[in-house]
Amino acid sequence: MSASTSSTPAIYGLTAEFVNPSELVAAANRARIAGYRNMDAYSPMPIEELNEALALPKTRLPRLVLAGGIAGTVLGMGLEYWASTIAYPMNIGGRPEFTWPSFIPVAYETTILGAALSAVVGMIVLNGLPQPYHPVFNAPRFHRASQDRFFLCIESADPQFDRQGTEQFLKGLGPQEVTEVAW
């Protein structure tokens, strides 16, 4: 029983390091136009133009926050209704048991609570967190992505990825350095 082992390790992709955000956005646009689809950009600050440059899909987070807010309203009103009409009904001066105007402040607060909790949980889940390891952490200078450098990574899973061709393409974008990202 012989196992075939390769002397060259499989790579995750290639990264190109840029000095400023405009270079990164321009590189991402050119890579998208060239046909690359499995790529990601890393930056020490948010860059709004990158969403369009990387052709990222719209986020589902606003719908999740809306659903959390509606659920908070329904649960808050339901709890108040249950408490004032079912569990502890009190007839004080002939007033009705369910007076919805008096329930608005609590319903408002539970709406905010539901929306905030769904935003936090939605961000964690949709961002795939926690993620203590990612292959790009193996790139030699990637620690600068949280300080002052901007990185574009084209993954080897991309159908158009060719080791030499992609490296030449990235070098043509004018980066500081192009490095291989090992698994």
Image: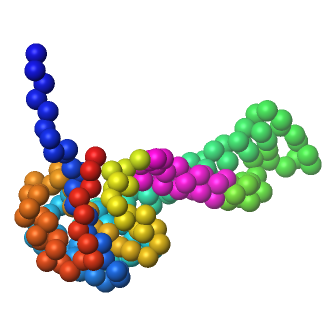
For the N terminus, which image quadrant? top left
Residue 178 to residue 24: above or below: above
Horizontal side, residue 4 vs residue 129: left or right: left
Q: How many marks?
A: 0
Does 126 appear in magenta? Answer: yes
Q: Residue furthest front?
A: 7
Q: Based on the displayed image, in which of its 4 quarters is residue 91 positioned?
A: top right
The one nearer the camera, 163 or 77, is 163
| Residue drawn at x 39%, y 74% as measured from the top left | 149
Name the main secondary structure of what is drawn in magenta: helix
| Residue drawn at x 7%, y 64% as measured from the top left | 165
Rendering coords of residue 9 (x, y %): 20, 44
Residue 6 to residue 110: above or below: above
Residue 83 to residue 99: above or below: above
| Residue drawn at x 10%, y 21% as measured from the top left | 2
Does 178 appear in magenta? Answer: no
Q: Residue furthest right?
A: 93
Rendering coords of residue 85 (x, y %): 77, 38
* Colour convention of the picture: rainbow
| Residue drawn at x 83%, y 35% as measured from the top left | 88
The one nearer the camera, 140 or 174, is 140
Q: Is residue 81 visible?
A: yes
Q: Based on the displayed image, in which of its 4 quarters is residue 41 positioned?
A: bottom left
Horizontal side, residue 109 vs residue 144: left or right: right
Q: Is residue 25 visible?
A: no
Horizontal side, residue 107 vs residue 46: left or right: right
* Magenta residues (range): 110-132
Rendering coords of residue 82 (x, y %): 72, 38
The one nearer the camera, 165 or 5, is 5
Residue 77 to residue 153: above or below: above
